[in-house]
Image (tube, helix red, strand yellow):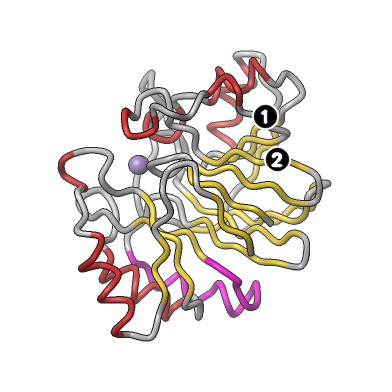
Amino acid sequence: MRITFLGHASFQIETEGKTLIIDPFISGNELASHIDVNQLKADYILITHGHQDHVLDVEQIAKNNPDATLISNFEIISWYQEKGFNGHPMNHGGSFTFDFGTLKYVNAIHSSVLPDGTYGGNPGGFILNSGGKQLYIAGDTALTMDMKLIPLTSGSLDMAILPIGDNFTMDYKDAAHASDFIACNTILGCHYDTFPPIKLDAEVAKAHFDGLQKKLLLPEIGESILI
Ligand code: NI
Ligand code: MN
């Protein structure tokens, strides 16, 4: 599984011959100006919740990849289906096996409204099981006891993508507690630096993880990680 950071909370995941785009917010992120949205290939677009900084480029990518399927909660997928896009709705606690592997939609503590004010359902995250690897994509969330259910019900994780930027989500210290809750010591941090309230001192955050014998990965935008 190849995970490429596209800035903010956006990722491209290549696995089992398929390409998944997660929460695309690229054209509105000047830190990601070297990423061309129109060059992105997608078989699936995963959306954790309805906020603009997670859905901004969904429609552009879906138009460029007309066979792509959107995956999110029921309310978000209904909104996109009314606009004519392909979608697969899920809801919390449910799993479905796609041609790239299995996704489970899990709880997040946050909010979710679509850009036009439409109710965006409850926010979530995904457990992706594919190619013999398991990845937790938390979405925007606070630290929550529900994270303890993940190792109990889904088994061990190879990596987790957690927000660490504070203000709108948990900070890096709570992300370290989350790492304990999910029993995964390899964390890929996201949702930081994009806006002034979520500026991160990366060295301090990494040192905090180092001190706990955990790993905090902060790839450059455009950089890939293999698991
Ligand atoms: Ni959000
Ligand atoms: Mn966000």
Residue at the image position 44 percent from the left and 78 percent from the top: 181
| Residue 95: x %, y % from top left | 70, 56
* Tag shown at residue 41: 1
- Residue bearing the label numbered 2: 19
Does residue 89 lie above or below 66 as drawn? Answer: below
Ligand 1 visible in quadrant: top left
| Residue 27: x %, y % from top left | 41, 23
Whether residue 155 is in magenta: the answer is: yes
Name the quarter where the N terminus is drawn: bottom right
The reply to whether callout 2 and callout 1 are in contact (CB within 8 Å) is yes
Identify the element where label 2 is drawn: strand
The magenta segment: 143-159
Whether residue 94 is in magenta: the answer is: no
Quarter assignment of residue 71: top right
Name the quarter where the C terminus is drawn: bottom right
Please, what is the three-letter code of the amino acid marked with disc 2? Thr
Quarter assignment of residue 29: top left
Identify the element where label 1 is drawn: loop
In terms of depth relative to the viewer, which is nearer, 185 or 124? 185
- Sequence-wise, the earlier of marks 2 and 1 is 2
- At label 2, counting other C-alpha atoms closer than 10 Å, the crowd grade (few under 14, some 14-19, many 20 or more) is many
Residue at the image position 33 percent from the left and 85 percent from the top: 212
